């Protein structure tokens, strides 16, 4: 469960990052009226430690936005899910050989071999849905996905994904998402 910690899913964030984050919401809802939330984990299996890291990071983000966690009577139900997958990347690697061109008096060469190389790349995705508990309607949705590279700080990646995801939260009625291309 490498992504466990990496639900940080946010993968490489800096300049060469593969992190993609998107948020969308109901533009008629005034999110500043909400004061309480509770968290619910969707069915994807993660280790207990990974679940706690994700739950704490989401809770801290929402608390920093002025909301209070209330397990008994929340105005918002925050449902989160982590998905782990992988994709195969292919590249051609040239090995050995000797070649020459016009600079060496002609065309030719010997012994060069092009071999396909295959690598499994781990991917992670975090989806967060926020439901108004009184109306029982989805009012906000965010998604982050990324390539999970070795040597990255997963908690830091999770924080970066959440910061970008909740950058415009809470919104006021009429405020449009920056983009709606999930």
Image: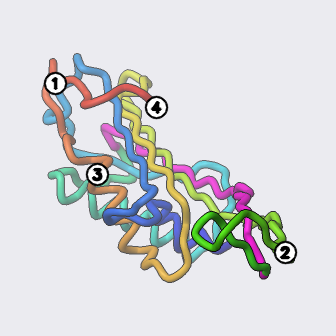
Q: Is 143 located above or below residue 49 in the figure?
A: above
Q: Is mark 3 on a helix, strand or loop?
A: helix
Sort mark 3 into few (<14), some (14-19) or many (20+) by Cα contacts within 10 Å. some
Q: How far across and how far down the image is residue 164, in percent?
A: 28, 51
Sort mark 1 into few (<14), some (14-19) or many (20+) by Cα contacts within 10 Å. some
Q: Which is in the foreground here, disc 3 or disc 2?
A: 2
Q: Which is in the foreground here, disc 1 or disc 2?
A: 2
Q: How far across and how far down the image is residue 46, in percent?
A: 64, 66
Q: Which residue is denoted by mark 1 in the rendering? A: 175
Q: What's the mark number on residue 164?
A: 3
Are discs 3 and 2 less than 8 Å apart at CB?
Answer: no
Are discs 4 and 3 less than 8 Å apart at CB?
Answer: no
Q: Distance between the residues labelled 4 and 1?
A: 18 Å
Q: Which residue is denoted by mark 4 in the rendering? A: 182
Which of pointers 1 and 2 lies earlier in the amino acid sequence?
2
* Way the structure is coloured: rainbow
Tell me the magenta residue range: 74-96
Q: Is 83 located above or below residue 52 in the figure?
A: above
């Amino acid at each position: 469960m490498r992504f466990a910690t990496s639900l940080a899913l946010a993968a490489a964030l800096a300049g060469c990052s593969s992190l993609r984050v998107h948020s969308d919401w109901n533009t008629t809802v005034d999110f500043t009226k909400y004061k309480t939330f509770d968290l619910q984990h969707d069915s994807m299996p993660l280790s207990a430690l990974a679940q706690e890291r994700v739950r704490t990071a989401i809770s801290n983000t929402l608390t920093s936005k002025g909301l209070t966690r209330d397990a008994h009577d929340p105005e918002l139900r925050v449902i989160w899910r982590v998905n782990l997958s992988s994709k195969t990347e292919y590249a051609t690697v040239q090995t050995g050989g000797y070649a020459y061109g016009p600079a060496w008096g002609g065309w030719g060469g010997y012994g060069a071999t092009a071999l396909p190389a295959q690598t499994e790349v781990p991917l992670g995705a975090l989806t967060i849905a926020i439901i108004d508990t009184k109306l029982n309607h989805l009012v906000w949705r965010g998604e982050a996905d990324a390539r999970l590279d070795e040597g990255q700080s997963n908690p830091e990646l999770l924080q970066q994904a959440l910061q970008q995801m909740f950058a415009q939260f809470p919104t006021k009625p009429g405020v449009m998402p920056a983009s709606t291309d999930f």
